[in-house]
Amino acid sequence: MNEFVFATAQYESGDWDSAPLVPANVIDSIARYTSIDVAPTGAIVSLSSRDVFRHPMLYLTGHLPVRFTAAERENVTEFIRRGGFLFIDDHNHDIDGAFHKTVTEEIARAVGRLVQVPNDHSLYRAFFHFEDGPPTTSHELNGWGDNLVHKHLQGVMRDGRIGVLYSNKDYSSEWGYHPDNKRFLAVDNTKFAVNVVVYALTR
Amino acid sequence: MRGLALVLVAFAAWSASRPPLERGAATASGSALADSLDRWTATAPARVHLALETAPNGARRDWLRALRYSGTPVAWHNDGPGVPALALEVAPVAGPRGGTMLSIAAPSGSRVVIGDAIAAIDSVVAARGGARLFAPIATGPVTAVAGGQRASATVGDTLLSRRVLVLGRATWEAKFLISALEEVGWPVDARLTVAPGVEVTQGTSRVPDTARHAAVVVLDVPPPGAAAAVARYVRAGGGTILAGAAASARGLAEIAAGRVGARIRPSSIVFVDDRPRQALGFRGIAPRGDAIVLEEQDGVATAAARRVDAGRVVQLGYDETWRWRLAGGTHALEAHRTWWSALVASVAYRAAARLPRAVDDAAPLAALIHRLGPPGAAAQVAPARALWSPSPALLFALVSLLLVAELASRRMRGAP
């Protein structure tokens, strides 16, 4: 009971399942670094179903244009109003890609406009400390996408808390590998995922 | 003997100069009481009997009591339907939104009109002997009127604002509890464990302290040191809510309202607005002998409360109320935070700043019975405090006896 379940949002349009290895990797990091009770496997939740309200944190990603159905939009609105936390990552890591344009429009319609999350926000100190804000991904400067380092994340604030956290840094690619391969990294690049989860659980 | 006789004659002369006592019994109704009291004070009747529809006000009750203590028996009986059994208590609500809770005792079915110094607040029909009413704002004395009887009371203290401390692990329950309390207006301190030796904290005060905290909510088994601190806080007058398995923790089990039982699945999978917690799993509570069961499902206690020394403890079987907030019906968000806020307010440490009280008449009938006894009972006569007042015949006999005794003494001694 009361265990954390990493839930991936499934939506009608686009490619919601573009980062299938991310949940396992994030779950591994939660179990590795924290004492949070975490379910060993993630869940896939249809954004148009009432199951959305069984998982207070949802992860949404993709490459393709996103258009919410009416039911999806209604659920997202209500989910955020009730205190849920939606983490959206642009799998394209570009400024003006199709996913970015459409999903930010949808979020604006469902919840409100995204604003810049300051780099000294408590999100960056929720567990590990990231003095410079969101950690850079290796995919931001690899020749794909816009070749820019996105210095800030964005969010929709609700009562002083982040309700929607939006990243176009492509953490979905950065964390999309088998957890066993962490041992080959000098620095575990999923640490920021721990911060996102701890923030969602405590703020 | 002669001197003693002279003293008695002087006493008789002084007694004769006093106004004569009214020897007949006097009766009066409540409406004529004011005039009657003046008259009875100047000329005391042999006894007083009152026919009352409503209780006299405090000053007149005291006046009647004084009459009784000056030697006039006073009794009363109900006139018509009788004096309504009305009582009123007003108490500040220990929550961030403040307000006043009005508790009214009145005959079942009677309509009670509530007002304050400015205007009428509301009216209620008493059920099962009373009613409770929340008034966000009440200015000056609060009055309750039922059947012509008026009771009044004022708030005797104002509660100082305190913070709520939440102890537990990083769970959805902790997150949504903190959100709910903050949305209502409670300032919240928190210590949430996320890893061994690592806590996410909020606020500056992390140790339970009656000077800072209105209540402590413990959501999981806390570290041993923290449990002992919570127990000390409660014994010193603080209030705590022990949710889920927290009540089984060493150091907290002694103060808990009951023993934590097995986890029971919810009886429904759908949240219904009027019984939302039926869709929540819980740990059953086996309450202690001195605990009060606040809520139960299918005969199993889900919430219980008890006093521990100067403090209060509420034990909850629920440990996933966040599901209610997130997946409940249309009003779940407001209902969840209101429920939690009320729970916290119910145990909140009440550090009071006393206010000067106005002259209250919170329970007129009870005060009347306290002063004059129950209706229809024979009037009790207080011990007479008046001076000895013998009859003139007795005085004459005593004086004559003394003079005869003196004459006889002189004769026997051969004195002239």
Image: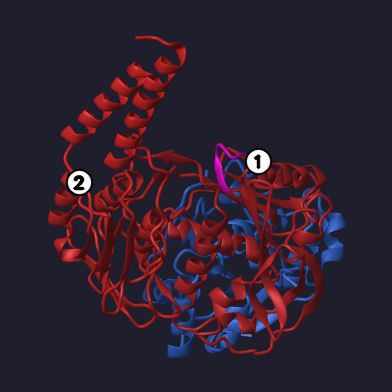
Chain colours: A blue, B red
Q: Position of residue B300 (x, y in %)?
A: 73, 80
Q: Position of residue B202 (x, y in %)?
A: 58, 46
Q: Separation of disc 1 and disc 2 at Cα?
A: 52 Å
Tell me which residue sits at (46%, 75%) in the image.
Answer: A103
Would residue B308 appear left or right of A166 to someone viewing this image? right
Tell me which residue sits at (16%, 44%) in the image.
Answer: B42
Q: Is residue B347 visible?
A: yes
Q: Secondary structure at mark 2?
A: helix
Residue A175 lies in the magenta-colored region: no
From the image, which quarter does the C terminus of chain B lie in? top left
Q: In front: B371, or A64?
A: B371
Count of all numbered marks drawn on residues in the image: 2
Q: Secondary structure at mark 1?
A: loop
Q: Which residues are magenta?
A: B209-214
Q: Could you say which disc has been placed on residue B236 in the image?
A: 1
- Per the image, the residue denoted by label 2 is B41
Tell me which residue sits at (76%, 60%) in the image.
Answer: B247
Residue B238 lies, with reference to residue A18, above or below; the image says above
Mark 1 is surrounded, within 10 Å at the Cα level, by few (under 14), some (14 to 19) or many (20 or more) other residues, namely: some
Instruction: Decide whether the magenta segment is chiefly helix, strand or loop.
Output: loop
Query: Looking at the picture, which amino acid does disc 1 mark?
Result: Ala
Q: Position of residue B215 (x, y in %)?
A: 58, 50
Would residue A94 appear left or right of B112 to someone viewing this image? right
The image quarter containing residue B20 is top left
